[in-house]
Image (spheres, rainbow, N blue to C red):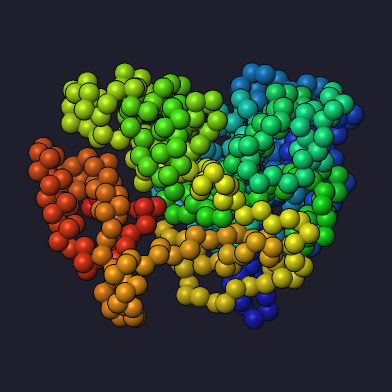
Amino acid sequence: MEKIDSSGALHNPKGQQTVVIKVGTSSLIRASTKSLNLSSLASLVETCRDLHNLGFNVIVVSSGAVAVGCQRLGLSTRPRELAKKQALAAIGQIHLMRYYDDLFTALGLVLLTLDNLATRSQYINARNTFHELLRYGTIPIINENDTVAVAQLRFGDNDTLSAQVATLVEADWLFLLTDVDALYTGNPSTDPTATPVHEVDDVHDLAVDTAEAGTQWGTGGMATKLTAAGIATAAGCRMVICHFNNPSVIVDIIGGESDVGTVFHPISDPLKGRKRWILSVPSKGEIWVDDGAARAIKKHASLFAAGITKVVGEFQHQDAVKLCDAQGRELAQGLTNYSNVEVEAAKGLSSAKFLEKLGYQGQEEVVHRASICLLVKREQGRSMRRTPSRGSMTSLASSRAPSPAGPESGYEDSPSHSPAPVARGQSPGRSRTPPLPPTTGQQESGAGEGQEGPALSEDDIVTRLAHLRQRAGLGASGPSDDWDSQMAYAMHAELQGSMHAKPVASDQDVDEGGWLPK
């Protein structure tokens, strides 16, 4: 496998699908000998080569640095102290990558922390780095930066990391290779009534026991895999849990020729742009809401203080929080406009009383709808997830067929050009959010190419103003002490210019002046 062919062209053509493969510590380390499972690792590398030769982009998220460090130092058990884990990660990472390097001919190592994905500029830079690595035909090997990442070493977050990487690169498939062959309703080792679950349409409707943690060498478990499934499917990526012993089955699953493992189907209208990034920001806490607020959130409404019933964790302004229903089930993730102390004091209050209690001019919305990433979308009580059965998946050749070439996406902060969405029963792959529907005026006039765009809707204006509020004085005219006058001026300007402006999706970014692009 070469980085550049004889003509000097880059390896990555238009329309390639991307496959992310995560391998856990329990799969890399033999429990009996506490040594690296080289034969299984070689099988994984062979599968990656097969996928690459078939025209897929491949990314590997690998755990095991701490465990390999234990092996190198002859430790029989994994230590609990954080400093020791970080030291072992520093030792093990070098040797683990040496094994990969011996087996691959073209790869790149990328060490990430959750903070790298939480900061918008770092998120974009990381995405551009991955795109460039894939363009050169390399297979990136990703691992959490264990030596400095405190939170990851406390729980098995490489599952979540792999989902965030899949979201970052807009992957079509995410495979979690583990020591079980599928998701079960309980632990099959201890529960004789546990049965496998082969397909999942909505991860939030699952009724499975995830109480047991991972092995002594790993830090994960089934709970982290379900968290990963929620992130990946919300971003339009199909996720599969399967056994590590036979990695070659990945090719068969993609081709619809195998029914092993558990497939989590993506939603039909996945997140993109800014909301895709919000989904990857580490959550600092939870806000629980009543049934009315939960229904409103599912209809893409903002969250107000009146619907809040409980606050969990410590967070500050613009931190990411989970929005949960009355039973604690996660509905969405959003960026909060207030700290946990302010939200706790305001829960259950009307907007007027909330603002009065704040003591300063703030926003009515605790979390604005433009900053809410809905993980489960429903319409008329029916799940909107695209759920083609495995039998309806077409051949591998069809699933990797390139889409028509489009304009070069470059590295700007916008969704890249990639395969078109597929309908139910067709080949799986990353689905795409369709363009915004035309306004009534546009439909009646039949506006053609080169004419002015449709008028902004009230929702578009509200979204722009919400972003302007969040910039807190960094709007069109710079710092201002009179925020009400600033907002009145902004509303007037938006209404005056709406007839000549193009519609703006609520997931687009603001520019340096605080405005969404026109």
- Location of the C terminus (image quadrant): bottom left
Whether residue 180 appears in this view of the structure is: yes
- Say above or below: 62 vs 215: below
* Residue 43 in the image, given as x and y percentages of width and height: 84, 51
Which residue lies most toward the right here? 32
Q: Residue at (27%, 45%) from the top-left corner? A: 466
Q: Is residue 43 left or right of residue 336?
A: right
Instruction: Looking at the picture, tell me which residue is in the foreground, 180 or 123.
Output: 180
Report whether residue 108 is seen: no
Q: Position of residue 73 (x, y in %)?
A: 77, 27
80, above or below 12, in the image: above
Furthest residue toward front = 380
Residue at 60% of width from left, 59% of height from top? 430
312 or 250: which is nearer to us?
312
Q: Is residue 312 left or right of residue 499?
A: right
Instruction: Tell me what residue is drawn at x 73 percent, y 55 percent.
Output: 389
The total number of labels drawn is 0
Looking at the image, residue 13 lies above or below residue 158: below
- Give the image location of residue 311, x and y in percent: 42, 22
Q: Looking at the picture, tell me which residue is in the foreground, 187 or 32.
A: 187
| Image quarter (top left, top right, bottom left or bottom right) of the N terminus | bottom right
Residue at point 82%, 60% (across, down): 257
Q: In the figure, is residue 393 to the left or right of 15?
A: right
Q: Position of residue 192 (x, y in %)?
A: 87, 26
